[in-house]
Image (tube, grey):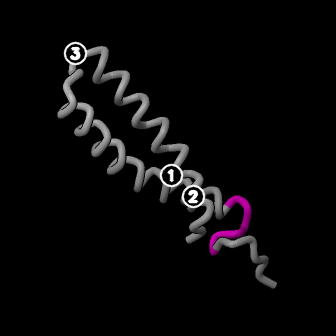
């Protein structure tokens, strides 16, 4: 696994997913702190498989699945 790529994808995906879920929760009236904490937990759990999937796909496109910029000779 390409861990640097995974961390970048995870950071971007976490921001986007929690942002979308937060807006949906606030628009529908779930604006108490408990609801916001639940949204953050759900967003975190959703982003782990999303980030794993897209980092594997991006790694296979670039040919650098194992990470750290090393080119296998």
Q: Is residue 59 left or right of residue 32?
A: right
Assess whether residue 11 is covered by the magenta stretch. no
At horizontal 28% and vertical 45% (from top left) the residue drawn is 41
Mark 2 or mark 3: name the one nearer the start of the chain.
3
Comparing labels 2 and 3, the label whose residue is closer to the camera: 3
- The residue carrying pointer 3 sits among few (fewer than 14), some (14 to 19) or many (20 or more) residues within 10 Å by Cα, namely few
At horizontal 55% and vertical 53% (from top left) the residue drawn is 54
The residue under label 1 is 10
Residue 25, quarter of picture: top left
Q: Position of residue 34 (x, y in %)?
A: 18, 34
Which quarter of the image is occupied by the C terminus? bottom right
**Mark sitting on residue 29:** 3
Above or below residue 15? Residue 22 is above
Above or below residue 5? Residue 71 is below
Image label count:
3
Assess whether residue 65 is covered by the magenta stretch. yes
Question: Along the line of sight, which residue is nearer the eye, 21 or 62?
Answer: 21
Mark 3 or mark 1: name the one nearer the start of the chain.
1
Comparing labels 2 and 1, the label whose residue is closer to the camera: 1
The kind of secondary structure the magenta stretch mainly shows is loop
Above or below residue 39? Residue 65 is below
At horizontal 72% and vertical 67% (from top left) the residue drawn is 63
Question: Along the line of sight, which residue is nearer the eye, 52 or 34?
Answer: 34
- The residue carrying pointer 2 sits among few (fewer than 14), some (14 to 19) or many (20 or more) residues within 10 Å by Cα, namely many
Q: Position of residue 13 (x, y in %)?
A: 50, 44
Above or below residue 35? Residue 47 is below
Could you tell me if the residues under marks 2 and 1 are in contact, i.e. CB atoms within 8 Å? yes
Mark 2 or mark 1: name the one nearer the start of the chain.
1
Q: Position of residue 45 (x, y in %)?
A: 32, 50
The residue under label 2 is 55
Report the magenta residues as a range: 61-66
């Amino acid at each position: 696994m390409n861990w640097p790529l995974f961390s970048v994808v995870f950071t971007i995906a976490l921001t986007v997913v929690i942002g979308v879920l937060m807006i949906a929760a606030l628009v529908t009236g779930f604006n108490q702190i408990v609801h916001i904490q639940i949204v953050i937990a759900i967003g975190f759990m959703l982003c782990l498989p999303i980030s794993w999937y897209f980092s594997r796909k991006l790694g296979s496109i670039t040919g650098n699945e194992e990470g750290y910029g090393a080119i296998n000779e």
